[in-house]
Image (spheres, rainbow, N blue to C red):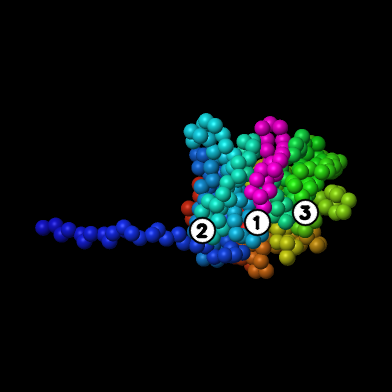
Amino acid sequence: GAVAAPPLPSEMGREPVVEKLASPPSKHWVWVNDFVFPHLADGQALLVDGDSGRFLGMLSTGTSFSRVVLPRDGKVIYSPETYFSRGTRGTRTDVITIYDGATLNVLDEIVVPAKRSSNMPVMGNAVLTDDDRFLLIYNFNPGQSVTVVDTASRKFVGEIETPGCGLIYPTGPRSFFSQCANGGLLAITLDDNGASVHQARMAPFFEVQGDPLTEKPVRVGDTWYFVSYDGHIYTVNHGPNGLAPGADWWLTTRAERQQGWRPGGLQQLAVHVGQNRLYAIMHQGNRDSHKDPGQSIWVYDLATRKRVQRITTQRLSGSIQLTSDARPLLFSIFMGSNILDVYDPASGKLLRSIGEIGTTPTLLVTP
């Protein structure tokens, strides 16, 4: 006859255990941010250890999610989020959720104006000032503005109008700029309360109609590196007198441009500040292919502006990110696949692949 299985041990009286992450976070961790295109109300951020390939944890982050924002000490995680009272409809509420960096539990939330932009995720949607004091959120409804949140008091402190200019690129503890439709920039200086005390517009510095810049620049110190659809690098420097255009140069030779080589992808550029290296996802296509993924990552020495390496990726890459330590890892993912690849950037060798990471992964964020 049938033999009854022994009863399962009782869970009564036993406290649930919440595992804790290492603190401070490992430099080799990466947050994979997921817009979840098939069901936008279910945004998520997934934490992976690049060394072991282990999946460490996940945050549920609401509708039209862009990315988590990480302060330097790693004690908390900021996540700009949007929710509707009936799931996909009803009253809209925008919040900055503050998660514990060790347990991923919710610590607090700050309600902000319900106008956070839900554009295709880019890093400039939400940033911290250089001293981590103010969290800045890009709004579009369709007026353009920046929400300012004080991370010390955990309060919404104001909104700054940025007509004709979008996204946010920090330049110091109390300054940032936005990219304007005419090819110029809008520079804004804050006071210690988070209010705008000075605004200045930088004249157009590229051809908007001829060869527009993407909205996906990367930063090394006081210099921001923008790339055009055709692969032309334009630099913007922040100094005592504000913003000024710097040197410009090409990622490609004339022959390579004739062969159709150009940058593409969602997070198409990455930098390693310590090594002064720029990484770019490259593919062959026409100008309208500037969002297309590629299977080649070209590496440049920023001092000489020369290409020093080409890494061929295992599969299509749409987003890349580097860790910031002396022996970095290079992460690569594409929203059309959910496999995170980890490379040794020094050799270009694929170290490991981690499957089933999200649904439509977008931005990669490292501590």
**Quadrant in which the N terminus appears:** bottom left
Type of amino acid under label 2: Thr
Determine the main secondary structure of the stretch shown in magenta.
strand
Question: Of helix, strand and loop, which one carries label 3?
Answer: strand
Seen in the picture, residue 356 relative to 40 is either above or below; the reply is: below
Q: Which residue is mark 2?
A: 103
Seen as rendered, the residue at the extreme left is 1
Q: Is residue 209 magenta?
A: no
The residue under the point 17% across, 58% down is: 4
Horizontal side, residue 347 vs residue 203: left or right: left
Question: Of helix, strand and loop, which one carries label 2?
Answer: loop
Q: Which residue is mark 3?
A: 172
Type of amino acid under label 1: Pro
Type of amino acid under label 3: Gly
Say how many tags the image has. Answer: 3
Horizontal side, residue 358 vs residue 243: left or right: left
Q: From the viewer's side, name the closer residue of 309 and 143.
A: 143
Q: Which mark is residue 71?
A: 1
**Quadrant in which the C terminus appears:** bottom right
Seen in the picture, residue 265 relative to 22 is either above or below; the reply is: above
The residue under the point 23% across, 59% down is: 7
Q: Which residues are magenta?
A: 137-159
The residue under the point 70% across, 61% down is: 272
